[in-house]
Image: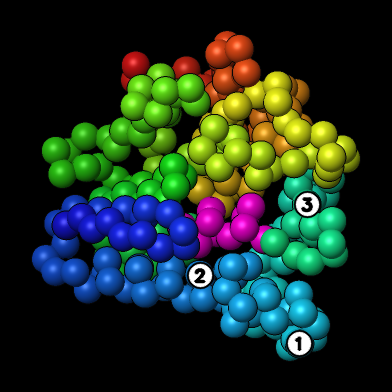
Amino acid sequence: MRDSRILMGMPITVEIVGARDATTINAVFDYLHQVDARFSTYKDNSEISAFNRGEVLPANLSDEMKEVLQLSAITREQSRGYFEIRKADGTLDPSGIVKGWAINNAAKIIRSRGHVDFFVEAGGDVQSGGQNEEGREWRVGIRSPFHSDEIIKVVTPRGQGMATSGTYVRGQHIYNPHEPKKPIEDIVSLSVIGPDILEADRFATAAFAMGAKGIYFIENLSGFEGYMVNAQGTATQTTGFGAFVLS
């Protein structure tokens, strides 16, 4: 069973092999709707918006918000400050970590209901488990940053998470916190495979903020692999990325 919906400002697809009805898929989308309602900086009535206006004190934040803010702080430290959710005006925007966190929790919902073969994709970030309906490993295509209808690599995450950060769809929405006024122009796409989608997503964002040296950060990060495309169209991959490539 498969369903796709527009949520959190992006198309989200959930596929569960062998599901007899839409109960679990609906539960996943209900959860993601709650995430959007809590974390969207575009909604005036969201918890993050209320917090940024000073209407909610840190001690009164929800457990979910506290968890995401703590993960953000940890990622900032682990990436030497290249991951930063505090904007120039002092407000917080945790969107660089919320998507992967939410997809990872969605996968937990699916597994908790006894499903092992599934696929969740949101805006190019993927968490899968088991096999597809043909009994094969799930496949994920990396799109060309220059031609949206072209797939430049096909990989199989093998149960791990895969996230792609880039400027070719949303423009310059990722910035280097150490040089916030300088746009990232030397690279256009960086895909990361990690232990799960939360890990892959948070480090993909941090690595992209590093520019061309981000791929070396991923190379030296245990349990992670990456594939980077620079502004000239040249690709660089970590030493172990090839093990996941099908074509």
Main SS class of the magenta portion in the image: helix
For image coordinates 68% across by 42% down, the residue present is 174
Residue 227 marker: none
Question: Residue lying furthest right in this view?
Answer: 178
Instruction: Name the image quarter holding residue 225.
Output: top right
Q: SS for tag 2? A: helix
Q: Amino acid at mark 3?
A: Glu
Q: Which residue is mark 3?
A: 84
Residue 36 marker: 2
Q: SS for tag 3? A: loop
Mark 1 vs mark 2, CA separation in Å: 19 Å
Q: Where does the image place residue 246, in percent across and percent down from the top left? A: 34, 20
Instruction: Name the image quarter holding residue 231.
Output: top right
Q: Residues within 10 Å of mark 2 (few under 14, many from 20)?
A: many
The segment highlighted magenta reads 94-103
Assign the N terminus to one quadrant of the image: bottom left
Q: Amino acid at mark 1?
A: Glu
Mark 3 vs mark 1, CA separation in Å: 22 Å
Asked whether 220 or 180 is in front, the reply is: 180
Residue 55 marker: 1
The tag earlier along the polypeptide, 3 or 1, is 1
Q: Where does the image place residue 118, in percent across and percent down from the top left? A: 28, 52
The tag earlier along the polypeptide, 3 or 2, is 2
